[in-house]
Image (cartoon, grey):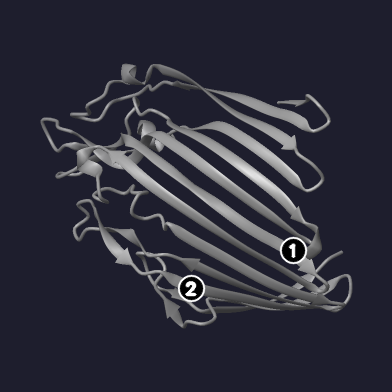
């Protein structure tokens, strides 16, 4: 990592990382297995980095330009450490699975609003995710039952922007943020439109809004949170386990809250609630989210 202050108002921060993965396998091979031990004699080296340019325009404005590359390496199960055999379908990892490559480009603007004791932050971003791998998507025929394998299924592109305000007024703290994101998947034909277990284009909401308001005075704290998420789709397994399907999910608003009383420096008593306006609410393709009320006692020493 390297920090470089070029001038009193312009700085550069950079960081780099190298990941090296060496594979090998020994021992017996299952009957009709499509790989030999030599298929695991592989070595891969991946580089990732972060680069940030920060420009302090004045006492209230800061501009940031960010560039980053990250790498997600498959785990040992996805690379073949687990083998499951049955009379109809076998499961295995694949040693030639490529790491996922994520590149992110972002431009941020921070602005202090001194009259309101608040801060504004806005950003625009573009992201490219290549060599995405799914837990299924590959099929290797053999003289017996075929093998289902993970596979690199394609590339996904995302772009959008965020805007956020937060501040403090006397005993009150508040914040609001909005995110717009649009995603386009470019997947192999056999894994498009939620037919496997990975789908970003249809399952990511385009609009997301978060609100929070809090009040604190002497021993008391009260906080409220609200979240809006626009309509999207969810992934569900098809009956019988042969792939997946997309199901529609409506937009929703969820509200959480917390009330706390600090008896002294050591003891704090609190009651919090999640999704408090609905006994049950459909937020995902799975089971409906239920209202939750919780009490807590915290002791610090």
Q: Which residue is mark 2?
A: 253
Q: To which residue does mark 1 refer?
A: 167
- Residue at 53% x, 35% y is 105
Viewer-proximal residue among 121 and 115: 115
Query: Separation of disc 2 and disc 1 at Cα?
Result: 23 Å
Label for residue 25?
none
For the point 41% across and 49% down, which residue is it?
182
Q: Secondary structure at mark 1?
A: strand
Residue 251 placed where, x, y %? 40, 69
Q: Nearer the viewer, residue 233 or 190?
A: 233
| Nearer to us in this view, 26 or 275 | 275
Picture residue at 27% right of the left edge, 48% below the top: 196
Looking at the image, residue 136 lies above or below residue 73: below
Badge 1: residue crowd in 10 Å (few <14, some 14–19, many ≥20): some
Position of the N terminus by quadrant = top right
Residue 81 visible from this viewpoint: no
Q: Position of residue 15 (x, y in %)?
A: 66, 27
Residue 203 in which image quadrant: bottom left
Graded by Cα atoms within 10 Å as few (under 14), some (14 to 19) or many (20 or more), the crowding at tag 2 reads some
- Which badge, 2 or 1, is on the more N-terminal residue? 1
287 up-or-down from 246: above or below: below
Residue 18: where, in percent of width, then height?
57, 22
- Image x and y of residue 239, in percent: 20, 61
Say left or right for 260 vs 65.
right
Which quarter of the picture shows residue 138? Answer: top left
Could you tell me which secondary element the residue under label 2 belongs to?
strand
In the picture, which quadrant includes the C terminus? bottom right
Q: Are marks 2 and 1 in contact (CB under 8 Å)?
A: no
Q: Nearer the viewer, mark 2 or mark 1?
A: 1
């Amino acid at each position: 990592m390297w920090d470089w202050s070029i001038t009193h108002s312009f700085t550069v921060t950079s960081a780099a990382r190298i990941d090296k993965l060496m594979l090998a396998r020994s021992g017996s091979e299952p009957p009709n297995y499509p790989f030999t031990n030599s298929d695991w004699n592989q070595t891969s080296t991946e580089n990732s980095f972060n680069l940030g340019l920060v420009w302090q325009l004045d006492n209230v404005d800061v501009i940031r330009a960010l560039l980053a590359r990250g790498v997600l390496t498959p785990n040992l199960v996805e690379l073949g450490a687990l083998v499951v055999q049955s009379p109809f379908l076998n499961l295995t990892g694949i040693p030639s699975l490529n790491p996922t490559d994520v590149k992110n480009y972002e431009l941020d603007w921070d602005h202090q609003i001194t009259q309101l004791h608040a801060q504004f932050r806005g950003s625009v971003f573009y992201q490219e995710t290549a060599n995405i791998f799914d837990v299924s998507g590959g099929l290797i025929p053999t003289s017996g039952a075929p093998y289902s394998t993970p596979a690199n299924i394609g590339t996904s592109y995302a772009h959008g922007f965020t805007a956020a305000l937060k501040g403090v007024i006397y005993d009150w703290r508040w914040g609001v943020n909005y995110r717009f994101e649009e995603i386009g998947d470019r997947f192999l034909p056999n894994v498009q439109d939620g037919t496997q277990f990975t789908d970003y284009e249809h399952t990511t909401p385009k609009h997301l809004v978060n609100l929070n308001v809090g009040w604190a005075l002497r021993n008391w704290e009260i906080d409220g949170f609200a979240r809006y998420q626009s309509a999207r789709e969810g992934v569900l397994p098809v009956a019988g386990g042969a792939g997946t399907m997309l199901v529609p999910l409506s937009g929703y608003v969820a509200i959480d809250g917390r009330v706390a009383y600090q008896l002294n420096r050591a003891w704090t008593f609190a009651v919090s609630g999640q999704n408090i306006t609905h006994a049950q609410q459909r937020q995902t393709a799975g089971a409906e989210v239920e209202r939750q009320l919780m009490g807590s006692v915290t002791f610090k020493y």
